[in-house]
Amino acid sequence: MERILFTLVLLYISFAVNSQGDLNTISTKQKIYGLSKFWQEVNYNFAFFDQVPNLNWDSAYQSYIQKVSQTTNDLEYYNELQRFCALLKDGHTNIYLPKRLDSLILQNSYAEFSFQVKNLEGGVYVIKADKHTAKELPLGSEIIEVNGQETEVYLKEKVIPLISSSTSHILWNWAVERMFWGTEGTYFDIKIRTPKGEFRRLRLTLAKDKRRLKTKDNPLYEFKWLDNKIAYVSLNSFSKSEIISEFEESLSDLHQAKAYILDLRKNGGGMTDVGTNILKYFTNKEYVLGSTWKTREHVAAYKAWGSPIPTIGWKGDEQYRKYLEGNSWIKGEHDTLFIADDFPKLLKPMVVLISNNTASAAEDFMIYLDYLGNRAKVFGQPTFGSTGQPLIFEMPGGGYARVCTKRDTYPDGRDFVGYGIQPDVEILETVSDYILGKDATLDQAIEYLKKEVKN
């Protein structure tokens, strides 16, 4: 299946404006036109209105006419558009800022500190920091206040309203990731609780010349042996077909293994056929069904035939009412993987690891795997839970928008967009695991396979 790779949406918290660039290029008429254009395309093409049953899209549009008209600059305007878009709660329906506004925004960039936070155990915790920063922000510290508000309240009021997300777990992950974004000079007064129970107050000031954390790039592919002849294979992306040849170079070792672990926790997607060219080795079925899809159908005359005409008492033809209500669908074919039997298969016990970061083509991989029934046990956390085929169009002032037009499901019609693919065994990440460098998901998978191999 052809998929547009998920692109991170830039969401901006601070409306502070500096002197860089012209921030007043969009007229009031253009602002209303841009809002109306987005409303229209969503109204006509959006595939997931049923997942926001309490949203009255027309009423929301009417209220935002005044909101966008009252914005004082282009950055404020685009933030209002992002709020409007976020009402749809879809990760593939987004508003993107013009490049000239993009350039004003700094992301977790401070002159005095260098650290990373993560959404863990219902809180925001420091999981990485350089030596200088760790003296003030020790690893495991919880951020409990931002600008005088409890952190949860701050995120709900200042950050989450701008985020387009299909799943609640990604919504909160992104909110934490983006809680300190804004223009240069914006500051955040935070209160932390250290692992020792001490309370500290610090000021974070956004600056271009930031301190940088040392990070390692994930390899495309990794193979290693674990205890009891368990083969560990990390598939970190399906964006490059080279991973297929790298995997096939490991086949002689894999055929000697007693069990396998496939790790897709860092796999944000790519090309679906790259993943299926690896999955085919792990089954002896002749074919495997992947996801199916549908998109809304519009026939103007059918809408008219289903429309009531009060002046003459006509109630509309019932059989065409679904067209009027936007609930007629064209269904696509199942994605099908046909598998030759002319090569040796890898049929020993297997565990697949997934996380919130498992997305797009990696979720396609998991849907094919689901069709194989009990072929593998799945450990980890729910996947990203958003995909589709967005319609992309320009917006006033150089930005653009996209609207998800295609609804992908399991072969039997079950939804995974809005929920994520669920693991058989859910293993929550903890603060202590991060601090100690412990991989609880992998550890439990190993223990499970040791028992399987023994049996």
Image (cartoon, helix red, strand yellow):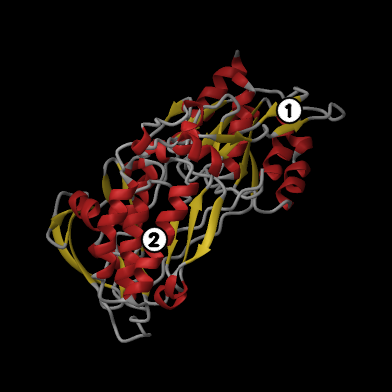
Is 340 situated above or below 213?
Answer: above
Front position in the image: 331 or 320 = 320
Q: Which residue is mark 2?
A: 36
Q: Alpha carbon of mark 1 to alpha carbon of mark 2: how far?
A: 54 Å
Q: Residue at x 77, y 42 (%)?
A: 248
Q: Residue at x 41, y 66 (%)?
A: 213
In the rendered image, which quarter is residue 85 located in? bottom left
In the rendered image, which quarter is residue 20 located in? bottom left
Secondary structure beneath dot 2 equals helix
Task: Name the amino acid, label 1.
Answer: Leu
Residue 21 is situated, as x and y percent measured from the top left of the image, at 38, 85
From the image, which quarter does the N terminus lie in? top right
Is 14 situated above or below 26?
Answer: above
Residue 333 is situated, as x and y percent measured from the top left of the image, at 68, 33
From the image, which quarter does the C terminus lie in? top right
- Total labels: the figure holds 2
Q: Is residue 94 left or right of residue 225?
A: left
Residue 384 is situated, as x and y percent measured from the top left of the image, at 47, 42
Q: Residue at x 75, y 26 (%)?
A: 287
Q: Which residue is mark 1?
A: 346
